[in-house]
Image (spheres, grey):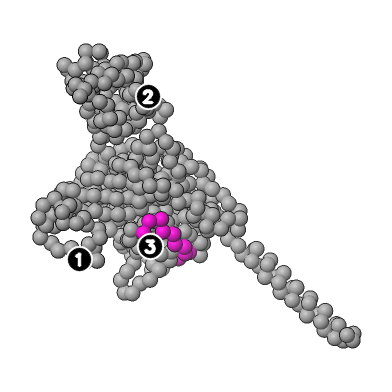
Amino acid sequence: MNSRAFGFFSLLLVIGASIVFGMLLGGKLNAPDVAHAAPMQNRLELAPARYVPSGSETIADVVEQSLPAVVSVTATQLTGKEAEESEGEDVPEMWEWLFPPEDEQRGPNRRPRVGEGSGFVISDDGYVLTNNHVVEDADQIEVGMQDGRKFAAEVVGADPSIDLALLKVNPRGETLPTLPLGDSESLRVGEWVIAIGNPLDFEQTVTVGVVSAKERRVPIGATDSMVVSFIQTDAAINFGNSGGPLLDGAGNVIGINTAIRRANFAEGIGFALPINHARAVMDQLLDRGYVRRGYIGITMNRNGIDDTAREWYGLPDGFGVIIDDVAGEGPAERAGLKKGDIIRKVNGERVRDNRDLVGKIASHQPGDHVELEVFRRGGRTFTARATLEDRDEGLAAINNRPLPDREERRATPKSGTGLGITVENLTRELRESMGLGRSVRGVIVADVTFDSEAADKGLLRNSIITKINDDSIAEVDHWIDVVEDLGPGAAVKMEGLQPNGTIFTVFLRVPGQAD
């Protein structure tokens, strides 16, 4: 090879190596970081968010770790208005698979309403998140695990405003697999996400896409678009995906799959509830079964602060909310706010627009105090301190409509009867009133039959039953299963705590005679 040819060949090698190196370097620099969040300071014992270096795990790795904690949710409505109004209605052929055969109907032309969705376990003692619309008005709820186990579930609480429901199952002393919660606020548009659920009865289906957009304000069911926004994704979401997790690349839940857009030949437009919205209300659902949000008592200018309004007020920018009216005797009036004032900041955070103000106020609870930076025409800026009221109550008064009966959304403690006593679940309110920690597991004695052996042997109301024979009792469902398996006439040992906290053991005989 002559020197000219050798020089040309060497030049080609240098150029090729430079291109390859540039591609590798560019790919490394543009690789998205996996977002992660600090462990949530929540009273539920949640798994900490996972951090995985970019590229160290495949989608298949994440899915394999996550699938055991994704559940199916079957909700059955046996009675009620919808069931009664369904008499005589024909079921479209495409929905026939949702309903039982004719011989399983409750009567001529009456069929139970059966809905199916998805969910995921967030604590190893059996708390599950799903959508409110999956379980709303259900008489029976069943949660199915990947390994085939099925559990009866009850609604601990629900928030229709963001389409969220918190369920509880009794794992009977076992620990359940869980999914860690991530930080939806740190999501970036274009980031890869994974949806898992049970679309159209195809269990444990996995789809992959990207975050198409954030903070979408779309009308979904009974949600309140002033307090909730959604993640838009092109990961395939279909009927039955509702309530399932939307995961980031590390396997953290960053959204709850909620709805799809089908009109006008839409394709690849799905919406998920940001997990941070769920984080913000889970403690309230656990405590009282429903969510209370702050309310300030103003009517906001619908057009916001455009260039003309900004010029008229002499504002340096377009941030803030113009007050069109102040509710009489409301928080804003008591704080000294007037029509025409502009709320510029809440607790030091700048207010972008009307929705941002509602979100900031609604993130607080009634009774909370907030500091408002207010601009009044003429150039005066001052700080006002407002004590918030209840959003639902305030809106009901303004719109002259009844207040929703939120107490109905509380989880009514299930009860079980047997051995001469009636027991109920040990709720958080009962724990707090009796000074019991979370480590105490059992059911509380709600009533003792006056002529029973249990009454004769001194068993008292408000005692906590922790064991029957060798079975630990954590919830009423477990109590019922254990008591039903006891044979008539059998001797039974019952252990627990008396109302004063002392340990007791009592031996009873199951009512009835052995065969």
Q: Position of residue 473 (x, y in %)?
A: 34, 28
- Which mark sits nearer the N-terminus, 3 or 2? 3
Q: Quadrant of residue 469?
A: top left
Q: Position of residue 226 (x, y in %)?
A: 33, 56
Q: Is residue 29 left or right of residue 135?
A: right
Q: Which residue is mark 3?
A: 237
Residue 468 visible from this viewpoint? yes
* Numbered mark located on residue 92 in the image: 1
Residue underneath mark 2: 470
Residue name at image x 72 percent, y 69 percent: 21
Q: 72 or 515: which is nearer to us? A: 515
Near mark 1 (Cα within 10 A), the count class, few <14, some 14-19 or many ≥20, is few
User: Looking at the rendered structure, which numbered label has been put on residue 18?
Assistant: none
Q: Quadrant of the C terminus?
A: top left
Identify which residue is drawn at 53% across, 58% down.
59
Q: Residue 213: in sight, yes or no?
A: no
Instruction: Give the amino acid type for the residue marked by disc 1 in the picture.
Output: Pro
Q: Residues within 10 Å of mark 3 (few under 14, many from 20)?
A: many
Q: Which residues are magenta?
A: 202-212
Q: Earlier in the sequence, mark 1 or mark 2?
A: 1
- The residue under label 3 is which amino acid type? Ile
What residue appears at the point 33 percent right and 61 percent down from the top-left corner? 200
